[in-house]
Image: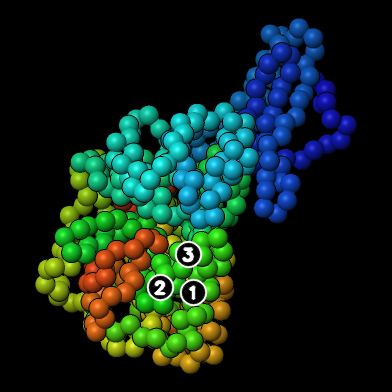
Amino acid sequence: MTLAFPKTKFIPLHNILWAEVSNNEITVDFVQQTSKSLVEPSNLTFRLAPNDSEGPSGSFAATFCRVLLARAYGEAKSRKCVYALLNPKSGPGSALRLWKNEVKPIFDAARMELHVVILGRGGEAAELAEKVDLRKYDTILACSGDGTVHEIFNGLGNRTDASHALACMPVSHIPCGSGNAFSCNLYGSHRASIAALSIVKGIVAPIDLISVTYGERRILSFLSQTIGITAESDLDTEQFRWMGSTRFEFGVMTRILKRKCYPCDVALKVEIEDKASIKAHHSRYTSNTSLARTPTGGAKPATEYGLPKLKYGTVQDSLPEGWKLVPGDRMGTFYAGNMAYMSPNVNIFPASVMTDGLLDLITIDGDLSPVTALRVMSQTHSPRFLDSSHVNYRKISAYRVMPRNQHDGCISIDGERIPFGPFQAEVHQGLGRVISKSGKYEAEGPANCQV
């Protein structure tokens, strides 16, 4: 065999998409980095001797392709069958362009089977996920912002076989919105083409999900729940979606200057309270691959149908015994996170773990001086944010928030608004499944954390 290119070309196995023998040639499809934010498909051709595709060279070529693909994909399933839900209204409205120009060419080169739906209204993704044939697809993919991911998890959660559906239908994400937290955490990037490659090569991994109850409703959360400055900075800046993730920073800065507080009563089921123990907990999970990827509790998909029973009831029940009451008169930010990144480069929960059965909770007083508050919030781009003396950081398994002296306000669940009022949440360990680059969050852990 002779290589059709004059110089040696080194291609990482992670970048190999496909290899096959056809017409006395071996063709290897792969992606190449064309800029810091873009990978694009390309290919190499190796010529066999004429009419030798069935001879010794042909046999060797077929074996070469099989071995190359086995090495390139490892644990990942090749040629995934994808149910892709494209939301053309997400973020700055670039989903269709990104799908056509950056994502689909990579999926096609990887010989993936694509079933594409262009969403036309809010709630449609949830309806489609609720009705999806679980045996037909390897993943439901949201080409969107995080809101469509939220809909997909809740659509699966609305099924009569919810626990089974959530445990056997992995969710994946092409980032086309404002925050794109799902992609940042699972693929280490908010760039569409890089996320596409991570999905091609991705493995199925468990993830904790959270039940949130308010009024008579129960919904699932995969990302975060917040009230106060962060909620307002998200939900009350919708008119600035054209700014992308910068709109969140704009919202935070304008509210910090007002030194606004959001009084509320807060009750927590605290599991780990001091920061040194939180760092040790994170190190234990990230240094043990099997511990990080295998839930030790939570739902039992093979036997449970519907969502798991709520361990602590709903927000309308009596407050469970043993929960810690936390003063909330000066509350500026109440922020509970299930992932590390909340938007590109904003690693606000650096100790977050995919399957530890715990939420990371940050509370910050609202009456800090603007200079101090801006200094604290400017550290959200650094893992040292956790170490700030103004940041209260806990690991919790459940909580209840009851706003006081406020007629209206913002509560954000995964970036989606819910009616203002009391709400309660609890974690279900390992209930959901995702397509992940490595089976863990692609985020830097806490500063001064031994792994």
Looking at the rendered structure, the secondary structure element under dot 1 is helix
Could you tell me which quadrant the N terminus lies in? Answer: top right
* Left or right of residue 265, residue 258 in this image: right
Mark 1, residue position:
251
Where 167 sits versus 418, above or below?
A: above
Give the number of the mark in front: 3 or 1.
3
Where is residue 5? Give x, y as percent: 84, 30
Corner quadrant of residue 2: top right
Q: Write down the residue under mark 3.
A: 239
Q: CA distance from mark 3 to mark 1?
A: 11 Å
Q: Are marks 3 and 2 in contact (CB under 8 Å)?
A: no
**Number of the front mark, 3 or 2:** 3
Residue at the spot 51% in from the left edge and 89% down from the top edge: 370
Contact, mark 1 vs mark 2 (Cβ under 8 Å)? yes
Q: Which of the labelled discs sits on residue 232, or is there none?
A: 2
Type of amino acid under label 1: Gly
